[in-house]
Amino acid sequence: MKQQSIFMGIFIIFYTTACSNTVTPMRTSFVQYNKGGGGGNPEVNLNICLSLKNRAKSQCLDTVFPNSPNILILPSNGKRIKLAGRGSSIEKSVVTLKNDDILLLNIETSTVKLPLTCNIKTAKLLQEQNSLVVSIPVKDIDKKVTLKNREGKLLLDYSIIKE
């Protein structure tokens, strides 16, 4: 009986040690690997940043934008804007900017004809599979932000109010 309990104890210790989760998922480890500033273009990873949650998203955005600007992310619920791409449906909204420095649009592009163009010349469009992140400096926005597909069809029309 004593040998059996020793064997069971060793087995339990081995099992809990061998089967514990010691590997961090790749999405959360992005922040850890890119803090060293080892080169590359961290803006390409904005798609990864926007897929993270809460504090991990904040840390990731801090690595991409190290000067700590005020960033407005649309939509703010963590999902992506779904562009219709067919018919006469246009994504419209009114956006109020207060003391924001950068506007980030997180867009689903699975149903649209790529590439997309933006009316703001300094906007950066970062595509990764069906996810597009549009990074726009607020100082360059006049009254509207529009996105068009390769055929020139208007897909997104946001009116901007600056306070």
Image: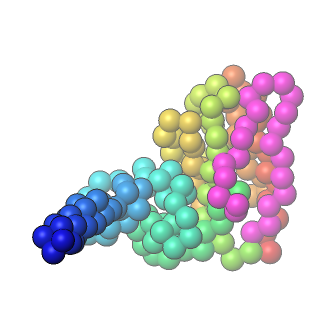
On screen, residue 127 versus residue 113, left or right, reads left
On screen, residue 159 versus residue 114, left or right, reads right
For residue 35: magenta?
Answer: no
Q: Quadrant of residue 30?
A: bottom left
Quick check: 100 above or below 120? below
The image position of residue 11, as x and y in percent, is: 20, 64
Q: Is residue 127 visible?
A: yes
Q: In front here: 145 or 80?
A: 80
Quick check: 88 above or below 104? above
Q: Quadrant of the C terminus?
A: bottom right
Q: Quadrant of residue 107?
A: top right
Q: Quadrant of the N terminus?
A: bottom left
The image position of residue 52, as x and y in percent, is: 52, 60
Q: Quadrant of residue 21?
A: bottom left
Quick check: 142 above or below 9? above
Q: In front here: 20 or 157?
A: 20
Q: Residue at x 74, y 58 (%)?
A: 142
For residue 89: magenta?
Answer: yes
The image position of residue 84, as x and y in percent, is: 76, 33
On screen, residue 11 versus residue 44, left or right, reads left
Q: Residue at x 56, y 36 (%)?
A: 130
Count all numbered tags in the image, as a single digit. 0
Residue projecting furthest to the front: 1
Q: Residue at x 86, y 28 (%)?
A: 88
Task: Give the extent of the magenta segment.
Answer: 76-97
Q: In front here: 81 or 42?
A: 81
Q: Residue at x 58, y 30 (%)?
A: 115
